Image (cartoon, grey):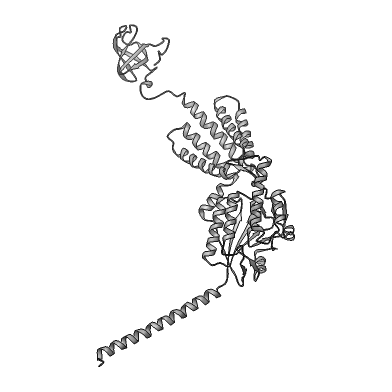
């Protein structure tokens, strides 16, 4: 027998079953619509700029951009390049991330007049598609050994080891990318450089394009072979472009690693520390100088610093200090200015930074720096001549009047600076005699008559 309660439970269960089926159908419908909308959304092209010396900051920026492209399911990553080269460690890091990128990567040497030299040449050949704009060049990838702050000469054996390692690394990916490894190696072994036409004819790059839009149009529908051997077809119909920018921290660090900024940091740091040492307790100059000097040391780790330039700047500092001590009628000051200008010119000089410190920046900072250094040193020397105005030293040499007669080797009273003091003397002094303080021992003054030979000392 089926009771009314059991029938009600069956109805409720049937209603719940129907409702669940409806919910599943709706979820499937919305999911398919969402997938369809994703599939029909315009392809995303994420653009990055490799502009300047290849250094850890730029490497972190490129790595973050490739990770962001993978996260956003971008159709393509386009790296626009204009670099003189840079550090091999940073170059290797960038190349590894390009080779491992799930999103196809295009490296494009642009705009007109740009270059992909040294480390940039290897980065160019590591991309899924290598492209150049007219009027650009790439190559000249011979390694230069750097040790700390200074460039180091290489003997023939060491040069061969470094070149062989670099060429083997280049072959490891250039062959899989379909480039000409034999010709590419000459950029390392012979420091050869190539125009965009020479690179295209020599199968070092895949195409030449006048602009980014032309490049992307030519890539639409192109089949490329990924580094892992898979074949992928680029679909760039109605693409959208999104630029991946440097973070505020990266922009700040990029500004530090500039020859002009390094020179300014060195001068401000030296002036701040010098001010703190010569005027203890001011605090602010020491703090600013210390921060600037640490930032300068960070930049010097990444830039090729010339030892002769550093010595000339130190010589200039010494000449500025001597100018305040020695009456040279400005000869030492002028010599310091010339020495600092030459130091700025020699401070940084390499194929990566052919301009070094600009003459305008060097001149505009050297003149006020020299004048300030001489002025501060003059204040220090002048302060050494000032008489102490506190403590017992204040009384030494002061004159007073005997108020109670003094017997030889006896005690009496004198008035000095409006105050009464107990005093002793080596000779008899009558009341009203003028005396001078020779020595202070506790609350006892040792005096002598005015006109005597002078102070006994301490």
Q: In which quarter of the image is residue 110?
A: bottom right
In the rendered image, residue 185, in percent from the top left (x then y), is placed at 70, 53
Residue shown at 56%/49% (left/top)? Answer: 255
Q: Quadrant of residue 444?
A: top left
Q: Quadrant of residue 371?
A: top right
Residue 110 shows in this picture:
no
Residue shown at 44%/36% (left/top)? Answer: 282
Q: Is residue 439 left or right of residue 101?
A: left
In the rendered image, residue 36, in percent from the top left (x then y), is placed at 52, 77
Q: Quadrant of the N terminus?
A: bottom left
**Which of 313 and 353 lies nearest the eye of the viewer?**
353
Query: In the rendered view, would you say 258 is above or below 374?
Result: below
Count every numbered label the image shows and give the total. Answer: 0
In the rendered image, residue 5, in percent from the top left (x then y), is placed at 25, 89
**Which of 316 and 169 lies nearest the eye of the viewer?**
169
In the rendered image, residue 378, in percent from the top left (x then y), is placed at 52, 28
Query: In the rendered view, would you say 212 is above or below 21?
Result: above
Query: In the rendered view, would you say 435 is above or below 346?
Result: above
Residue sitting at the far front:
1
Q: In this view, does 64 lie to the left or right of 52?
A: left
**Which of 451 and 20 lies nearest the eye of the viewer?**
20
Residue 360 shows in this picture:
yes
Q: In which quarter of the image is the C terminus?
A: top left
């Amino acid at each position: 027998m089926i009771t009314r309660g059991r029938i009600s439970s069956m109805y409720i269960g049937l209603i719940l079953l129907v409702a669940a089926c409806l919910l599943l159908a709706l979820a499937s419908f919305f999911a398919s619509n969402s997938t369809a909308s994703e599939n029909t959304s315009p392809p995303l092209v994420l653009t990055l700029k490799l502009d300047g010396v290849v250094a850890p900051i730029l490497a972190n920026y490129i790595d973050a951009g490739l990770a962001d492209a993978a996260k956003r399911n971008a159709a393509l990553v386009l790296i626009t390049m204009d670099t003189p080269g840079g550090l091999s460690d940073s170059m290797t890091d960038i190349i590894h991330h390009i080779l491992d990128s799930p999103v196809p990567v295009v490296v494009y040497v642009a705009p007109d007049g740009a270059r992909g030299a040294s480390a940039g040449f290897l980065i160019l050949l590591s991309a899924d598609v290598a492209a150049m704009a007219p009027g650009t060049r790439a190559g000249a990838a011979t390694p230069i050994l750097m040790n700390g702050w200074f460039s180091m000469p290489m003997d023939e054996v060491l040069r061969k080891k470094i070149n062989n390692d670099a060429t083997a690394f280049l072959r490891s990916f250039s062959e899989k990318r379909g480039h000409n490894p034999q010709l590419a190696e000459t950029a390392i072994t012979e420091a050869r450089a190539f125009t965009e036409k020479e690179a295209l004819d020599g199968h070092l790059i895949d195409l030449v394009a006048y602009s980014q839009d032309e490049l992307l149009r030519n890539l639409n529908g192109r089949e490329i072979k990924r580094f892992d051997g898979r074949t992928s077809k680029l679909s760039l119909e109605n693409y959208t472009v999104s630029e991946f920018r440097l973070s505020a921290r990266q922009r700040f660090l990029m500004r530090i690693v500039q020859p002009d900024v390094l020179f300014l940091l060195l001068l401000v740091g030296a002036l701040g520390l010098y001010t703190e040492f010569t005027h203890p307790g001011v605090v602010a100059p020491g703090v600013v100088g210390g921060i600037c000097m640490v930032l300068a040391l960070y930049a010097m780790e990444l830039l090729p610093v010339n030892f002769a330039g550093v010595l000339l700047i130190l010589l200039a500092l010494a000449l500025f200090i001597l100018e305040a001590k020695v009456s040279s009628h400005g000869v030492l000051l002028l010599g310091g200015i010339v020495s600092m200008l030459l130091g700025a010119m020699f401070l940084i000089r390499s194929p990566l930074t052919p301009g070094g410190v600009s003459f305008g920046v060097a001149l505009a900072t050297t003149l006020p720096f020299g004048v300030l250094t001489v002025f501060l040193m003059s204040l220090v020397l002048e302060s050494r001549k000032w008489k102490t105005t506190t403590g017992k030293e204040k009384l030494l040499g002061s004159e007073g009047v005997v108020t109670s007669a003094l017997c030889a080797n006896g005690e009496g009273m004198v008035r000095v600076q409006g105050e009464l003091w107990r005093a002793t003397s080596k000779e008899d002094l009558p009341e009203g005699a003028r005396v001078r303080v020779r020595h202070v021992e506790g609350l006892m003054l040792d005096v002598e008559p005015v006109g005597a030979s002078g102070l006994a000392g301490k």
